[in-house]
Amino acid sequence: MTKKVAVVGVGYTDFNSMTPEVSWKEFMYEACQKAYIDAGVDPREDIDSFITCSEDYWEGFSIFDEFVPDQIGAVLRPCCTVCGDGLYGLGNAYMQIKTGKMNIVAVEAHSKISDLLTFGDIGLFSYDPIFDRPVTGSVDRTHFAGIPSYEKNSPKPLVGKTNEKERIHPYFLAGLEMQNFLRKTGTTEEQCAKVVVKNKKNAFNNPNAEYEVNITIEDVMNSEYLFKPIKKLDISLNVDGAIAFVLASEEAVKKLDVEPIWLRGFGWSSETPWISTRSMDANYAMLASRMAYKMTDINNPRKEIDFAEVDDRFSYKELQHLEALGLAESGEAGKMLDSGDLDLNGSLPTNISGGSLGIGNCFEATGLQKALEVVIQLRGHGGKRQIEDVHTGISQSWRGIPSGSGAVAIFGR
Amino acid sequence: MMTIKSKTEGYPRYAPGTHVSGRDISNKNVTYSWWEPEVQYSWSLGPAYGRFLQELKKGKIIGRSCKKCERVIVPPRMFCEYCYRSTDEWIYLKDTGKVETFSISYLDPNARRIKEPILIGVISIDGASPMHGFMHYFNDMKPEDLKIGMKVKAVWKSEKERTGSITDIKYFKPMNEGDK
């Protein structure tokens, strides 16, 4: 059995708020083709198994996995889909290689969220239908035995023409969590605003980022409240993009002409879906990281980890996640931000890629975006945003609103 | 030590009672939760499907070739799924083909019987490689006349009615002598 598993190839598209010029298939093809060229492998010959990560409702297909083999090179080959974030796919690839049955495995995740017209409603669809959805606004439509009946003169509702006003946007849950986080840790709204300023500035050095902008803490603070205490600029905006990874066993690495980046540790965890019962402290990230630290033999993450890419789809999430990962004490992450520790030249550079606030929210590809940046940095391919002297990096994902699940992957040279 | 019950132990073989009817639900005699999501998508077509549908609007069927595996692919794709490379050229095809398989369908999505059965099947398009084509309706024939291997021809909507959709072809009809 192989002892070690490495990332041997990465490929990715540009990240754009809209991509009307390509279908999701061509988009996935581009990312995978680039990853296979990067690794120097032929998917039709060399890759033993293919994994994609997607959520049917984002895509608009039932059993979306049936529609992926063509564009990733997996026709008539072992292929499966992980219904979840890209980091889960990476973990599955790791496990497949560890079985000894597979030597080289490809992982793909993407967002083509611009194809979805009713984003907020699909978000609400992930809430508990008996307890949580009914209190996001009343929807009173006449129906008979489970089949809706519409008014004769408006047989089908159009976008934005239904009782939309009566429903709350699903992101309100982040408002609940942020309120709790600020109170518990003493973190301020200004510190959260500073995360936005930092990440959007970092994105200037990432040519693939979509939302780079020079703004001040005041700009964020003055943006309107959407889900108090969350303001408009605290929220990452949606983006389209595809990312692919090629992983290989230690033995297979030797046959490839690549500099391997080792996947040294991996962990994942899920909280209860009960909004009233779960932690609101990102315990999923805490437990996933402990699992990964144990596997990597990391006892003092603050010292042994050089830089971090953590989920920052809402500004406070970056600070909350850093604390959950044990990279900051409770209430300390905001102070580290204030003292410049999270900057490019700081002691723990965080979301140097621009994060989700700077690049955009790429949904199931978010975890792979974090992992991608760690690989780029460890390879020394960061260009203007290259962090000096890095050996170990951590990437962390969260499955997004309203989930309490996430994964952690640790990479090393 | 945990004891594992056999599957039937402790339960009656048949639980007596009254089945819930549709009327019980509509009269709200049973408690249930109801939610209707708003689900709408608008998929970007990209160069391959986009061109294909534009050509349908003009009353033409177009495919793409892969020079490596020597296939003419329809509906067209920008990459070859077997060779894993970009495809090469656009090729216009005929609007005739061969029935590969078919079914005569009698039920609507709610499993209610429909009056006139729908004839549906897979057509290999002439000019494309074998087993390359798409699914469509058949009409202008009796259900019992529909056969595998039968030659068929597209019946198009009028130019005005066409919108750039697979249904710009109304259906396929049996090919008569003299049809091109």
Image (tube, coloured by chain):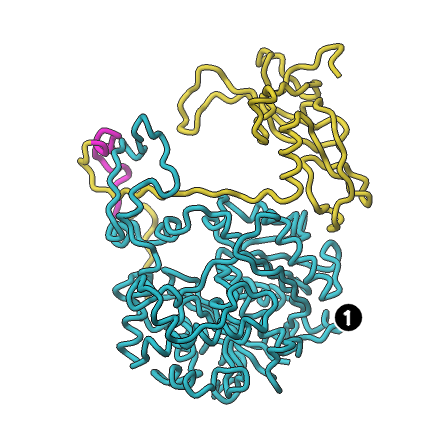
Chain colours: A cyan, B yellow
Q: Secondary structure at mark 1?
A: helix
List the residue tagged with mark 1: A255
Q: Residues within 10 Å of mark 1 (few under 14, many from 20)?
A: few
Hey, which quadrant is residue A371 in on the image?
bottom right
Q: Position of residue A19 (x, y in %)?
A: 57, 51
Question: Nearest the camera: B14 or B34?
Answer: B34
Q: Is residue B147 magenta?
A: no
Depth check: A10 or A405 in front?
A10
Figure check: B166 above or below B115? below
Q: Quadrant of the N terminus of chain A?
A: bottom right
Identify the subunit bearing mark 1.
A
Q: Residues in magenta?
A: B10-26
- In this view of the protein, which residue sits in the foreground, B26 or A159? A159
| The stretch drawn in magenta includes residue B19 | yes
Q: Amino acid at mark 1?
A: Lys
Residue displayed at 51% across by 22% down: B105
Across and down, in percent, residue A14 comes to 61, 60
